[in-house]
Structures are given as C-alpha cells and as structure tokens.
Amino acid sequence: MIVENTGLDGLKSDLAYLDESAEKVGFIRWQWEYYRATYDYKIEFNNEEYFLRINTRAVEGKLERPDTVLAIEAVYMGRATFPHGLEYESEIPALVMKTASHKLAELKQLLEA
C-alpha cells in the first residue's frame, strides 16, 4: 500500500543527514545501489511483521558519497511474507498505521529542521 499525504514526497536531503535522521527514528537503510536507496522501519503486531518503506533516489551524486543529495519518492507499507518479501495488498491494522504515521512525522520534522 502506498502511504499518501506523508509530507515526505519530494523532500531532499544529503545522504549523511538522511542516514542519521532515519536512524534516530528507527529506520535502517536496507537496500541501496548507486542511485537509489530504501529505508525500512519494522512494526510487529499480532505475530505479523509490517515494514514501512521509504524509497529515495539520488538527484545529485552517487550513493557512496555522504554529500549525495537524495529525494524521497514514495512511502509504502507492506506485510512480511515467508520466506522473504513484502506483500503490499493486505489491509494494514489501524494501530500499525498509527505507529507508521508517528514515525513518518518524526522523520519529516528532522528533515525539515
């Protein structure tokens, strides 16, 4: 599921600051390559795991440099499936969405500071 109205879409930050801010809130830069990266936050609820995923793309530089500028493209929420992967079509419980919204607001506040 795409999480709408986060206020994060299009925000830009250098890699070093985005990594630091995301880590403060509990996100981990999980997947990355030269021009894009994803940041994940895991939420456990009722023996299920949900991941809040933020997709970013380099708009200046390449990801191996801390001064590379990244733009946030989209925010997704998915349920973890066995053995690995995320399923984006499941309904997300309200408590999980509340936690996700809180984490996104925290990150947005740090990035806009």
Image: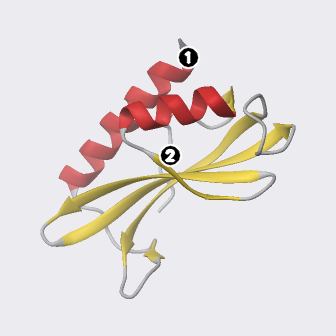
Q: Is residue 37 left or right of residue 51?
A: right
Q: Amino acid at mark 2?
A: Glu
Work out how far the residue at label 1 is from the one at label 2, CA to CA, in angstroms: 18 Å
Examine the rendered structure and indicate whether residue 51 appears above or below residue 24: below
Q: Amino acid at mark 1?
A: Glu
Residue sitting at x 22%, y 71%: 48
Q: Is residue 69 left or right of residue 17?
A: right
Locate residue 91, reporting x and y percent: 32, 68
Examine the rendered structure and indicate whether residue 93 appears above or below residue 72: below
Front residue of this view, candidates 103 and 17: 17
The residue that mark 2 highlights is 4
Residue sitting at x 39%, y 60%: 51
Locate residue 102, reporting x and y percent: 31, 35
Residue sitting at x 55%, y 22%: 111
Q: Residue furthest bottom?
A: 83
Instruction: Give the label on residue 112, or none.
Output: 1
